């Protein structure tokens, strides 16, 4: 019985899940230890929560780009919905007496719900397109969301919450602006923590990896691999693509709420086209459809610009050169085959050798 259990091989899904959870947990424990012992620089301490937020963004976008096979360039729009709705929710509950973790949880839930609704509504017309057309339209919707945030004004006074598309909210006594149009959110109470970011990353991994291994996930991948064959066996293409798009948007809103509540002020322009491209770079650099690759890429590319700050004017040039070299290496057949052979050799060396000798 023991031999049968020991000889049972882990499925690829289980291996990938173990690798992803192990990478995230090990990184969290190491960084927490270094932070407690004062070995982390102040700049790196400030990047811990953004790293968690960008990991959530990269893994959630991989659900659309890698699993569903659609190119989306509007992910920063869903991130902005989650960020600003989370800030408003936190501001509404600021004097409610609730502890900060509860307020953060409420903000994350509201951000995820509103971003999921936005993803569902946008996905209905957008997902009827394919290829470059889909990328252009999602880019347009991302810019539309950013410009909507530029004209939204939300304030709070003793009478409650006031919302309008102009600065004249008619606020009374003890008023406070939560969202101030193009000036964004100001005087935000920072309640995001590295621990909450770690928990959200685990939740994102759990959701995405379970979708990949579920019946719905296999249907999504079947629609990606061969649309005609999927339709011929009765799969509803629009249904499954919309499911992946909506879940991805909800997870992006969750990451946006974590990100937004990490800063004392936040501008809508932060969530522009460049942010969408940056998130897509995380996915492509880590490997399309590769979850733990997205985790590593998001972490490294978030830290790299700050690590290169000593080069001053040449910082972004060095950043671009590193990206180009990494992409060349990961897409070079000879280099990939070399690393593949090295991994296979290590696995072969780890296999237990058969016991020698014969009976009798």
Image: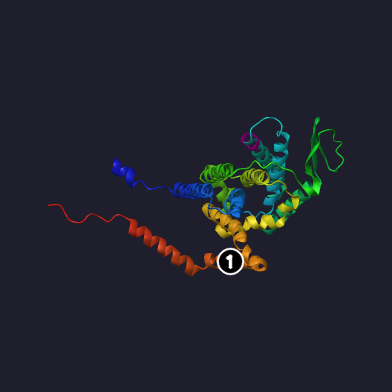
Image: magenta residue range? 101-105
- Whether 54 is drawn above or below 156: the answer is below
- Compared across the picture, whether 213 is left or right of 324 comes to left
Give the image location of residue 231, x and y in percent: 60, 48
Residue located at (65% from left, 57% from top):
278
Give the image location of residue 186, x and y in percent: 75, 45
Quarter of image, res 251: top right
Give the main secondary structure, helix, strand or loop, of the magenta stretch.
helix
Quarter of image, res 347: bottom left
Residue located at (72% from left, 37% from top):
91
Q: Nearer the viewer, residue 87 or 212?
A: 87
Give the image location of residue 214, x and y in percent: 52, 43
Query: Is residue 104 part of the magenta span, yes or no?
Result: yes
| Residue 68 in view in this figure | no
Secondary structure type for disc 1:
helix
Residue position for label 1: 322
Q: Nearer the viewer, residue 334 or 154?
A: 154
Q: Nearer the viewer, residue 250 or 133?
A: 250
């Amino acid at each position: 019985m023991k031999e049968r259990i020991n000889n049972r091989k882990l499925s690829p899904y289980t291996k990938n899940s173990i690798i992803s959870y192990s990478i995230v947990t090990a990184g969290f424990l190491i960084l927490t230890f270094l932070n407690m012992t004062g070995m982390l620089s102040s700049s790196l301490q400030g990047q811990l929560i953004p790293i968690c937020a960008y990991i959530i963004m990269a893994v959630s976008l991989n659900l659309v780009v890698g699993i569903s096979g659609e190119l989306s360039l509007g992910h920063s729009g869903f991130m902005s919905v989650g960020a600003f709705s989370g800030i408003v929710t936190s501001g509404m509950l600021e004097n409610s007496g609730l502890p900060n973790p509860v307020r953060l949880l409420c903000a994350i839930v509201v951000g995820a719900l509103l971003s999921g609704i936005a993803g569902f509504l946008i996905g209905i017309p957008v997902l009827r397109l394919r290829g470059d057309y889909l990328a252009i339209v999602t880019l347009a919707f991302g810019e539309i969301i950013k410009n909507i945030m530029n004209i939204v004004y939300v304030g709070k006074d003793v009478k409650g919450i006031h919302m309008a598309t102009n600065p004249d909210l008619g606020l009374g006594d003890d008023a406070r602006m939560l969202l101030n149009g193009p000036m964004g959110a100001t005087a935000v109470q920072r309640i995001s923590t590295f621990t909450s970011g770690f928990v959200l990353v685990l939740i994102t991994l759990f959701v995405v990896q379970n979708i990949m291994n579920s019946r719905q996930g296999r249907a999504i991948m079947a629609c990606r691999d061969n649309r005609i064959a999927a339709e011929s066996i009765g799969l509803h293409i629009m249904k499954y693509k919309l499911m992946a798009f909506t879940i991805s948007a909800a997870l992006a809103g969750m990451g946006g709420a974590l990100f937004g509540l990490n800063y004392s002020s936040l501008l809508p322009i932060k969530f522009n086209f460049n942010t969408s491209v940056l998130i897509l770079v995380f996915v492509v650099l880590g490997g399309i459809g590769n979850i733990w690759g997205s985790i590593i890429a998001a972490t490294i590319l978030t830290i790299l610009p700050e690590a290169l700050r000593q080069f001053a004017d040449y910082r972004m040039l060095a950043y671009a050169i590193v990206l180009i070299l990494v992409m060349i290496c990961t897409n070079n057949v000879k280099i990939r085959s070399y690393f593949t052979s090295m991994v296979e050799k290590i696995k072969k060396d780890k296999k237990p050798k058969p016991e020698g000798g014969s009976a009798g």
